[in-house]
Image (tube, rainbow, N blue to C red):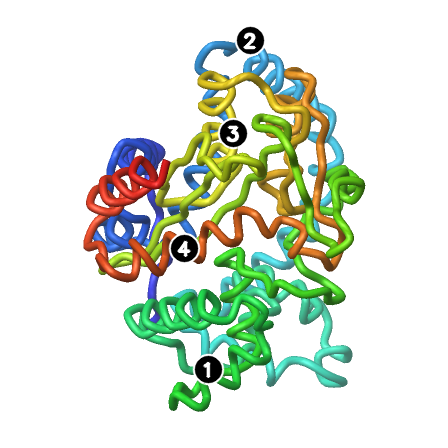
Amino acid sequence: MSRKRKTYTAEFKAKVVLELLESDQTVSQIASKYEILPKNLHDWKKQFLENMSLAFDKSSVVKEYKAKINELEVDKDRLAKKLGNVVIERDWLSEKLISLDLSTKKSFLAKEEGTQAAELNNVPSLNRQLTLLSISKTAYYYEPVPKYEQAWEKELLDKIDEIYTEHPYYGHRRIWKQLLELNYSIGRKWVRSAMLHMGLMALYPKPKTTVARKEHKKYPYLLEVYKNDKNQVVIDKANHTWSADITYVRLEKGFAYLAAIIDWHTKKIMAWKLSNTMDVSLTTSVLNEALSRYPAPDIMNTDQGSQYTATEHIDILVNNGISISMDAKGRSIDNICIERFWRSIKYENIYVNDYKTLTDARQGIARYIVSDR
């Protein structure tokens, strides 16, 4: 029996996204509650944030639909001319079993492809048959492979976080080898993908260090002129240079992301936020909080991650007259100030307390940062 793909109403998606935005639960917990994939939840949140302005400007939507209606009217005659081809395809498809499962559909198509199919009259091409039977090329050629259990994935992500915190100069190859030594049977590419997902990068020069968007503008590294003879950045006054970054925080059932801004001179945390998703709204909210509490710095330094190169984040810096500095390509060590803070808070607070929920983690991290000031 084939499995029907689940569909969700707009009301259901809105309800779940609002719960995600207002809740202290992780993405994994909310996804499990409603029996949906965490990726779907991430996508729904992104779509919600991108389109929430439509609630106050319906005229643009109406205009868009009017334009589409006009296009449909123009296409009407052209579609009528294709009716003959549609009838042929319909007649061919009606002769086949409608309720075929994927394996049966694939075996049927295999009988019709090749020279034999080319010699038959009124039989669509293989590509057209796949479309009519709702089979993607990926599904047609795909061979199932074992998937990891969600709990096991969580265990691996936590272990990768521990190894990286202990050895921040490790790349995905060395972390993968250490996992193998710990009897984890896992592929190197999976480790690399996990590290990209967690925002982890080795602290040494290497060919590629950050997940960036090609369409986003990149800015030069401005802190080179502040380096001493030992190649260390030295900022001699407070509120001159800030640095921002995001790190992975493990919880008992899932994980969260901690974003923070630190002052290079005082090592004070200017603002921070713990969230169940990692997107541009996380970084912009932390930046806006810092600017509401302190005077704008001369320089803001970040990596080239998509959250920091996004237009929303860049616009805030430009509007406040802040010079934008980004780690040089292959030089994540340029942001070493906040990387050291991540190491300290994980060893001195996060790992020690082993937080159960997002609320527990938020309260515990708040106590740590206040005491550290």
Real-space Cα separation, disc 2 to disc 4, in angstroms: 51 Å
Question: Which label sits in the foreground, 1 or 4?
Answer: 4
Q: CA distance from mark 1 to mark 4?
A: 39 Å
Tag nearer the camera, 4 or 3: 4
Amino acid type assigned to the residue bearing label 4 in the image: Ser
Looking at the image, tell me whether mark 3 or mark 1 is earlier in sequence order: 1
Residue that appears at 38% across and 46% down: 41
In the image, 183 versus 53, the foreground residue is 183
Label placed on residue 344: 4
Q: In the rendered structure, find residue 84 and report the number of the disc placed on it.
A: none
Residue at x-position 67% and y-position 46%: 304
CA gap, disc 3 and disc 1: 39 Å
Q: Is residue 185 above or below residue 333?
A: below
**Quadrant (top left, top right, bottom left, bottom right) of the C terminus:** top left
Residue that numbered label 1 is attached to: 145
CA distance for labels 4 and 3: 24 Å
Work out whether 14 lies above or below 99: above
For label 2, count other residues whose C-alpha is less than 10 Å away and answer few (under 14), some (14-19) or many (20+): few
Within-10-Å neighbours for mark 3: few <14, some 14–19, many 20+: many
| Lower sequence index among marks 4 and 3 | 3
Q: Earlier in the sequence, mark 1 or mark 4?
A: 1
Does any portion of residue 179 appear in the rendered image? yes
CB of mark 2 within 8 Å of CB of mark 4? no
Q: Which residue is mark 2?
A: 59
Of residues 102 and 202, the one nearer the viewer is 202
Q: CA–CA distance between discs 2 and 1?
A: 48 Å
Mark number for residue 284?
Answer: 3
Instruction: Name the amino acid, label 3.
Output: Thr
**Element under label 2?**
helix
